Image (cartoon, rainbow, N blue to C red):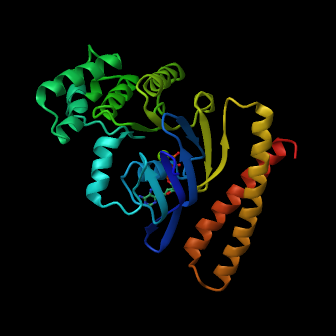
Amino acid sequence: MKSYIETKDLVKVFKLGSVEVQALRGLSIQIEQGEMVAIIGPSGSGKTTLLNIIGGLTSATAGQSWVAGREITNASSAELGLLRQKAVGHIFQTLNLIPTLTAYENVELPMLAIKMPSSERKKRVTELLTTVGLGMRMNHKPDELSGGEKQRVAIASALANDPPIMICDEPTGDLDQETGSKIVQFLHKVNKEMGKTIVMVTHDAALARQTDRIYRIMDGKIISVQKPSESEESNAAMRVEMYRDRLTETELEIADLEHIYKDQKINAGTFAERWTNLNETKKFLERELHRMGL
Ligand SMILES: Nc1ncnc2c1ncn2[C@@H]1O[C@H](COP(=O)(O)OP(=O)(O)OP(=O)(O)O)[C@@H](O)[C@H]1O
Ligand SMILES: [Mg+2]
């Protein structure tokens, strides 16, 4: 039985000239319906890439994915279009609000795409903007709104077509702590009261701890899964085990990489990029284990 959102051994390779960037390298994740999970990890670790695959914006180079209980691994672009319109509400790291449209029009846009009748649209846009506390700002353009207000328009717009899943990429990114925390409180409401499954990327450990589960991602792989509700000790013990496994794996990968470079199977650019990355991961893991007194 597959989870509501699931990926298995996802690989994503971006090619830039002769250099290959491997953004995901065997990433597996399982999220159940109704859960709110956080994904945390360093810059460049593959968080946005993962969200873009789950959200049907990009396809993976290898591996399988299931979203809303359906396999999307080999979905056609029309099927992915439907997924984006109906199944997944996406709040982008860069927000993606249209600067020339008002808050009202930005929220209405996804409804126009599915040809929702005009009276229903009007009711729903007004309702959504009121829910996010922007009933008095409907005719403001993004430039005429504060950071937190823009974020709320983006949330209303992601909820426009009542998708069962919400994907939020750093929804508190540029906001001060208080505004950020209000946004996350609102997402909790969306999760509990509207029953949406929420996947949220955040760099804020305190906000991550308020979710059902925290996935840590590093160098394109999940390195630990943590339940904030479990005791700190059992979480720490689980982390140590995962970090140790990952360290052994990383050391093997470094040795492998040096081999294939010597055999001239990859070019210097790809080798250097990969080698630096792996050594960064190794250093991080050693530092963390050291910090935990090991
Ligand atoms: N379109 C692209 N073309 C080439 N490389 C890309 C592309 N998108 C992402 N990458 C690379 O893939 C890796 C993962 O990027 P991603 O955006 O998923 O990271 P992230 O974890 O979201 O980082 P951040 O926290 O900074 O947003 C990075 O090394 C990045 O440079
Ligand atoms: Mg990102």
Residue 292 appears in the figure? yes
Looking at the image, which is closer to me, 172 or 79? 79
Query: Which residue is found at the position 48% from the left and 47% from the top?
Result: 5
Name the residue rendered at 87%, 47% in the picture: 294
* Image quadrant where residue 76 sits: bottom left
Q: Residue furthest right?
A: 294
Residue drawn at (57%, 79%) of the image: 266
- Residue 140 visible somewhere in the drawing: no
Q: Nearer the viewer, residue 119 or 263?
A: 119
Q: In the depicted view, which residue is nearer to us: 241 or 207? A: 241
Q: Position of residue 242 (x, y in %)?
A: 74, 51
Task: Give the x, y percent position of residue 36.
Answer: 52, 34
Residue 224 location, x and y as percent? 67, 47
Vertical placement of residue 274 versus 212, above or below:
below
Left or right for 141, reference 220? left
Q: Residue furthest left?
A: 118
